Image (tube, grey):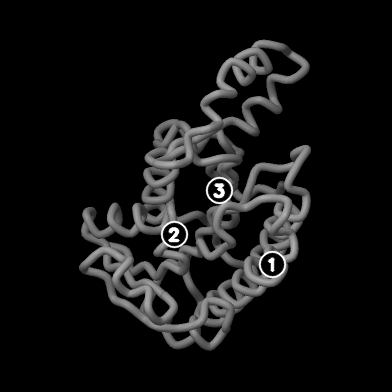
Amino acid sequence: MANVWISGATGFVGRNLTSALLSRGHRVGVLVRAGSESRVPPGCDIAIGDPLDYASYRNLLGEADTLVHLVGVSHPSPAKAALFRQVDLPAAKAAVDAARDANIRHFVYVSVAHPAPVMKEYIAVRSTVEEFIRAAGLNATVLRPWYVLGPGRRWPLALAPLYWMLGALPATRDSARRLGLVTLSQMVQTMVLSVERPAVGIRILEVPEIRAASFGALKGERSMNAVKS
């Protein structure tokens, strides 16, 4: 049984991940802002705090072995570039520093597929956080989805024929795979498996590994060993 703290547990992925971890018998704590307590599943330990503040994490992690960091601006778009620097970056820096100082065994972070032709500031911030993780010397799993399909988030399915065509062409096949779509259930399953089988070093999971959603299919060097982007 893992002892997991999650920041960003009230979001799209966070709520589902929290429920999945609880259902598998893990102890789960969540860091939420005041007034958001009702949005987390029953059975969690709840801490009220500011996810952009190092002190909010520092007081939680004494007995934890895993920190899952999911804080970020909702519905990212190019118009929110400034918010990525104001919210995503300081929240991640606070979480990484607290995890380092608490000697957390495993840090789980959702980054983004890169490089990509759009969302340059979003990708830049997430890439910077990946560098924070490396500099801190953490054992970490970094997931790099491009777009997560789920309730209210299915419009990219209209692009399925385009993905098929790009995937069939040798010149664009790698990009189509790297920037492919993943489902919410694939994301959650892969994150649960990441918690249950902590990385040694830094483990990068790209879209193909997330789609596999099984460590039986993740035995390749890129997914299971310490790698650099």
Tell me: 89 left or right of 40: right
The one nearer the camera, 159 or 200, is 159
The one nearer the camera, 75 or 203, is 75
Q: Residue at x 59, y 23 (%)?
A: 159
Displayed quadrant of residue 54:
bottom right
Amino acid type at mark 2: Gly
- Marks 1 and 2, the one that precedes in the sequence: 2
Amino acid type at mark 1: Phe
Residue identifier under label 1 = 132
Label 1: how many residues lie within 10 Å, few (<14), some (14-19) or many (20+)? Answer: some
Provide residue 3's location: percent of width, then percent of height: 33, 69
Residue 221 is labelled as none
Answer whether labels 1 and 2 touch (C-beta < 8 Å): no
Provide residue 201's location: percent of width, then percent of height: 58, 57
Tell me: 109 left or right of 22: right
Provide residue 132's location: percent of width, then percent of height: 69, 67
